[in-house]
Image (cartoon, helix red, strand yellow):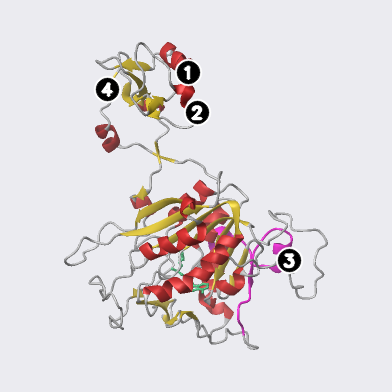
Amino acid sequence: MPRKKFAKPVARPPSSGEAPPAEPLKARPSPLVDTRIIYCGDNLDQLKKLPDACIDLIYIDPPFNSNRNYEVFWGETRERRSFEDRHASTQAYIEFMRPRCLELARVLKKTGSFYYHCDWHASHYVKVMLDQIFGEDSFVNEIVWQRTSAHNDPSQFGRVHDTIFFYARGEPHTWNQHYEDADERYFAAHDFEKDEEGRLFRKRDLTAPAHGDSGSGQYEWKGKTPPKGRMWSYTKQNMEQLEAEGRIVYTKTGMPRLKIYADALKGIPLQDVWVSPDLWLNAASKERLGYPTQKPLALLERIIKASSNPNDIILDAFCGCGTALVAAENLGRQWIGIDISPTACRVMAKRLRDVCHLREDENLWRAGRGFVVRDLPRTNFGRFRHLSLRTGPSSPWAASPIRPRSATRGLTAASIRSPRCPGKAARPWGNSPSWTCGTPSR
Ligand SMILES: C[S@@+](CC[C@H](N)C(=O)[O-])C[C@H]1O[C@@H](n2cnc3c(N)ncnc32)[C@H](O)[C@@H]1O
């Protein structure tokens, strides 16, 4: 893996006429890297500016190789913006992503976590690439996120889920256990009974697969020993304590079981299948900005809460309209965002101002508040230059906003139009039958 030298933090340019303050950033969580920055540009170039092992959590939601054109109409003028997610082949897509993921692996801390959001178009190939980069042993979860309630896809099961691969570089990685409330389906599936006081409980096996130094779990308990290959889940001392508390019941054959009281349940630890309307971005949601492929804040908050702590540094290198940045800011984390599209950068800057009440201000940022946008292309007239940006050999994410800075103010979500089924040829594995005109999902 190439290692880029990065001896010093990125120098900040002086602001208009004012001398930079002598003291370092108040809220600077790392001496190596500046945070609360949006970098506009190709992440392959921007990532090279970051030092090794400086990021606690990376989430990316890159193009999915969906072979689609995303079109959106912004604001009252219904100005058209579009970007394409097309690659000559899945291999071309993977070769586009590979050097970027190598850079992302380089900047991730040893205790850090990496989440790659994708879908059926390329997920299996992405998994193989990530195993090669991070190592198979670093794979933690394949999260199935149901993004909508139903899809009427003809002649097939509705495609309603995305896949999020979770890798952690080492042990221990940052992990905060979160729980979901147990619903009636959980109680129905677990044969709850009532004890003599009327409290609901279920019985749990008191053995576990034998592992490590299993000596402390191999003893006789009331004439019983654990089955072959298993051990008692608790030491003898702890079993005695549970027995004294009345927490153990016995089966007809005399095997002990632990009573798990429903009223003492913290909830159900989050699993790797995320099916909850709370994690959907509905058409009428106030959160919706009209940015194609925008993800729900609740989804990002779940990931950030689980895999980072306050003031940790979160990086989203394909950050679109900045969902990960807003979630990170709301949760008291530091953040860095990168996007190749100047439009996206302006949209997320506005979102940070409107939703998080952060000011985009060089001086405030130097004082540890506010945020800055770097490398936004502008002409002498204060307009963005026309850019023809490509994410792959044949894939322009055509970000070409030629308009004054102020024009991004007051953007309202209008409509997202899918293509009139363009370019259905030239996919070696054939075109997906789910290609429909008029659906905003991928
Ligand atoms: C699927 S969108 C991300 C959406 C985002 N998660 C959100 O909730 O808004 C992918 C983004 O990646 C950006 N992108 C594509 N290629 C890029 C590159 N090489 N460098 C940086 N950003 C890129 C696009 O401009 C687009 O905004």
As drawn, is 95 to the left or to the right of 359? left
Q: Is residue 273 magenta?
A: no
Can you identify the residue that label 2 sits on?
213
Q: Residue at x 60, y 48 (%)?
A: 310
Which is more N-terminal, label 4 or label 3? 4
User: Which residue type does callout 1 highlight?
Assistant: Asn
Can you identify the residue that label 4 sits on?
193
Q: How far from the left and from the top, in percent, is residue 248?
A: 37, 17
In the displayed structure, 83 sits above or below 277; it is below
Quadrant location, the C terminus? bottom left
Q: Nearer the viewer, mark 4 or mark 2?
A: 2
User: Which residue type does callout 3 highlight?
Assistant: Asn
Can you identify the residue that label 3 sits on?
363
Q: Residues within 10 Å of mark 1 (few under 14, many from 20)?
A: few
Q: Nearer the viewer, mark 2 or mark 3?
A: 2
As drawn, is 402 to the left or to the right of 256? right
Which is more N-terminal, label 3 or label 2? 2
As drawn, is 224 to the left or to the right of 356? left
Q: Could you tell me which secondary element the residue under label 2 belongs to? A: loop
Comparing 289 with 220, the one in front is: 220
Can you identify the residue that label 1 sits on?
238
Spatial separation of the CA atoms under disc 4 and disc 2? 35 Å
